[in-house]
Image (tube, rainbow, N blue to C red):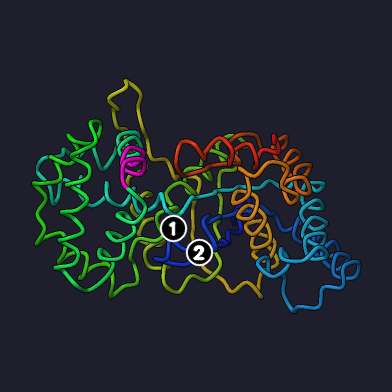
């Protein structure tokens, strides 16, 4: 049996629609529960339902977060979690940044581009820096047009978008070298494999699949810190992304013994030895998933408003985040996005704003 189960759900995932202005942030939340914790929370959820007249059959964060009573119900349940010593894991992703990151994933893959070494697949610091530069250099319209063409069926449109990106990057001094490297990509191999491997399996790049590596790192770090040796991951059903998430978990598990030397002198390893299983369950079957869904909704809305001075929802949930940060520390938070957004998002989730 597992020592503990981390229940995982997401909020704001619109699949490939990473440029949706109505939901600029994708959030994933993990709630770490033992069987004793779960039994304790049954009463807390029942009391929240009574106090705030929650009639829905199961807790749905995206609906509760929209009303004052719903937010109070979420706050009541999550506060009960912290009083029981339950830990949270929280990831916020600025979704437009996903597109810039995928430019790097595609065009620096040594399988399709001999101009880049295999270290570009393994060294996250290289990819992070390059994605930040591309995100800053490309106009939103250019990046969005490329993203749509990449995930469409018109190869000629994709090639035109590819040429536009290269042309614009060549005009930016700190992106010119990257742009020149992109010129040697094997477009036939890349396009054909994208169509063959991604679309039929529902494995297109989208936040809920590409964020999974960060999620696994966060879980492993917390498991090592608290010394959980046998962790089960239960994720809300993800019909489109389940195969990608499962496969990626297996890849990380197989790579857990590798250690990579980075250019900055540090080493990177891929430990997942404490994360034994990943399975998918319907949220109505697991109270832990419903609580994770509520937490994910709070994470999403708070990171969407993290740059707004004196945002009311941040004030409401700040004490909760402060207490969560005291319990778990920095291992509870991971943010992915442009450099001018990351510190605001982290501070919001740490209750520091």
Q: Is residue 7 above or below residue 320?
A: below
Q: Is residue 145 above or below residue 59?
A: above
Magenta highlight on residue 191: no
Label number found at residue 163: none
Task: Determine whether, in the image, residue 24 is placed left or right of residue 313.
Answer: left
- Disc on the earlier residue, 2 or 1: 2
What range is drawn magenta here? 131-138
- Percent from the top left, x then y, of residue 218? 52, 43
Residue at (46%, 36%) from the top-left corner? 339
User: Residue 209's quadrant in the figure?
Assistant: bottom left
Quarter of the image with the C terminus in it: top right
Direction right: furthest residue: 51
* Front residue of this view, candidates 294 and 168: 168
Label 2 secondary element = loop
Task: Determine whether, in the image, residue 34 is placed left or right of residue 343.
Answer: right
* Front residue of this view, candidates 199 and 134: 134
Mark 1 burial class by Cα count in 10 Å: few <14, some 14-19, many 20+: many
Determine whether label 2 and label 1 are within 8 Å by CB.
yes
Label 1 secondary element = helix
- Percent from the top left, x then y, of residue 266? 35, 23
Task: Determine whether, in the image, residue 19 is placed left or right of residue 161.
Answer: right
Label number found at residue 207: 1
Magenta highlight on residue 134: yes
Which residue lies under the disc numbered 2? Answer: 13
Q: Is residue 112 above or below residue 217?
A: below
Residue at (18%, 39%) from the top-left corner? 170
Provide the major secondary structure of the magenta segment.
helix
Mark 2 burial class by Cα count in 10 Å: few <14, some 14-19, many 20+: some
Quarter of the image with the N terminus in it: bottom right
Q: CA distance from mark 2 to mark 1?
A: 7 Å
- Percent from the top left, x then y, of residue 30? 60, 53
């Amino acid at each position: 049996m597992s020592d503990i189960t981390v229940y995982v759900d997401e909020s704001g995932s619109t699949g490939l629609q990473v440029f949706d202005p109505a939901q600029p942030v994708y959030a994933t939340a993990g709630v770490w529960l033992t069987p004793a914790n779960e039994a304790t929370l049954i009463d807390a959820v029942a009391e929240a339902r009574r106090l705030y007249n929650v009639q829905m059959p199961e807790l749905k964060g995206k609906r509760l977060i929209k009303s004052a009573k719903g937010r109070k119900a979420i706050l009541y349940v999550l506060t009960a979690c912290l009083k029981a010593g339950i830990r949270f894991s929280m990831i916020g992703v600025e979704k437009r940044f996903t597109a810039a990151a995928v430019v790097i994933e595609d065009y620096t893959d040594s399988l399709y581009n001999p101009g880049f070494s295999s270290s570009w697949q393994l060294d996250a610091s290289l990819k992070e820096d390059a994605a930040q530069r591309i995100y800053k250099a490309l106009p939103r319209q250019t990046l969005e047009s490329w993203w749509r063409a990449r995930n469409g069926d018109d190869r000629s449109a994709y090639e035109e978008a590819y040429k536009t990106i290269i042309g614009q990057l060549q005009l930016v001094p700190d992106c010119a070298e990257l742009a020149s490297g992109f010129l040697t990509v094997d477009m036939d191999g890349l396009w054909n494999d994208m169509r063959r491997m991604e679309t039929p399996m529902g494995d297109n790049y989208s936040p809920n699949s590409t964020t999974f590596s960060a999620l696994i790192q966060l879980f492993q770090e917390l498991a090592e810190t608290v010394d959980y040796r046998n962790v089960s991951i239960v994720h809300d059903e993800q019909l489109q992304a389940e195969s990608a998430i499962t496969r990626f978990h297996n890849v990380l598990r197989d790579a857990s013994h590798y250690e990579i030397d980075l250019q900055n002198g540090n080493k990177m390893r891929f430990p997942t030895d404490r994360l034994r299983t990943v399975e998918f369950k319907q949220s109505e079957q697991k109270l832990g998933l419903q609580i994770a869904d509520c937490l994910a909704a709070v994470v999403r809305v708070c990171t969407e408003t993290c740059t707004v001075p004196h945002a009311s929802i941040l004030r409401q949930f700040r004490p909760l985040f402060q207490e969560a940060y005291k319990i778990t520390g920095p291992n509870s938070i991971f943010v992915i996005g442009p450099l001018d957004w990351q510190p605001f998002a982290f501070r919001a989730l740490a209750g520091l704003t």
